[in-house]
Amino acid sequence: MPGWSTLPGVERTTLITGGSGFLGAHVVAAAVARSQAEGTLAEPLGPLVVAQCRSSALLAPRFCSPREAAQWIEADLLEGLAGLLERVQPTEIVHCAALSRAADCESDPAGARALNAEVPGQLAAWASTHGARLVHVSTDLVFGAEDAPRGGFSETAAPGPVSEYGRTKLEGERAVLEALPTATVARLPLLYGNSAGRGLGASDSILEQVERAERPRLFVDEWRTPLEVSCAGAALVELLDFEAPGVVHLAGPERVSRYELGLAVLTSMGLSLEEAEAELQPIRQEELDAGAPRPRDVSLNAAQAAEALSVELPGVSSGLARAH
């Protein structure tokens, strides 16, 4: 792809922020798998993988095998970022940590800006000074002021966020690229897949609600290009091996509503379409106060990444088959 080239192999220390989160745990797993694949008899575990999380209660590496393959560090990114970087001295960073609950960002815009915009800028400045590679995770919700065109927003489309979360994530993108123009900003869509029984993500949260005999309310007029989370994690790790400056979209190839995704989740678990429909409540955005403005269509066009990466960016059916 234009502007993309494979970076030469070097001794690496990989830092993943937000390593205990829904996405972060899969990024850690992918980084560990890469490390093991690159291991030698002298260094059987390959490059060092370090995962940051904000609380010691979250230090269990849920997806890593062997469990000791990643080092887990408790650190508050708002208070202890400099100390974390000094301790780890990473040669490459995947920055997953964020304040991602939209309602929390609306109620605490200063806190959202600190974590979603200021911390990424500080990470990028450190990476620039120390020659480290940075892949910064952003979101499709930097769009929303206008509906996506046919085929989805490309990387060159003008952002237009409608929520505080989207605005602060866009500020974070700009802070990263201003401090480190060679960084990669990876915009991700709605993610689904295995959350290790935690009820996180777009599919496990539905399954958990149905298991509690609830009827999830899902929008019929909100469209995304959802992506299976382990594929997202593997793609972010593969991006570390490229010189891919600027923005790249990682998303699935299908534009679906939240309700359509819910039906796909339940039918992938063995329910008939009629049974799945009986378990869900289709609603329109105007019927629910979600605590933050919600865009209608932030579908992404990820053709560039799909062509350049070896990791598959699957459609919903194959992604759910992989997840469950």
Image: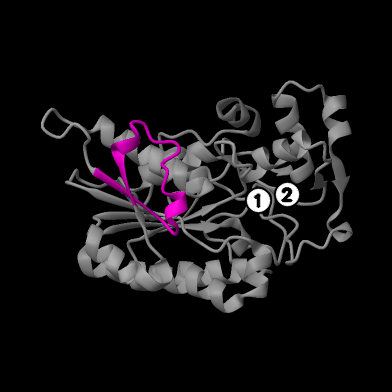
Q: Please say if 56 is above or below 129.
A: above
| In the depicted structure, whether residue 160 falls above or below residue 214 | below
Give the colour scheme of this rendering: one colour
Q: Which residue is mark 2?
A: 223
Q: Residue at x 27, y 30 (%)?
A: 37
Instruction: Specify the farthest residue to the bottom.
Output: 110
Question: Which residue is located at x 59 percent, y 42 percent?
Answer: 198
* Residue in the foreground of this view, choosing between 201 and 168: 201
Residue type at mark 1: give it.
Ser
Q: For the residue marked with disc 2, what is the amino acid? A: Trp
Is residue 288 rendered to the left or right of residue 237?
right
Q: Residue at x 24, y 50 (%)?
A: 13
- Counting from the top left corner in percent of width and height, residue 305 is at 46, 44
Helix or strand or loop: what does disc 1 sit on? Answer: loop
- Tell me, yes or no, if residue 128 can be seen here: yes
Q: Residue 319: image x %, image y %?
A: 59, 31
CB atoms at circles 2 and 1 under 8 Å apart?
A: yes
Q: Quadrant of the C terminus?
A: top right
- Report how far apart the C-alphas of labels 2 and 1 lie in the structure: 7 Å
- Range drawn in magenta: 48-72
Q: Is residue 23 magenta?
A: no
Q: Is residue 49 magenta?
A: yes
**Vertical relation: 207 (above or below) 58:** above
Residue 20, position as x, y percentages in the image: 46, 49
Q: Which residue is denoted by mark 1 in the rendering? A: 299
Residue drawn at 28 percent across, 54 percent down: 92
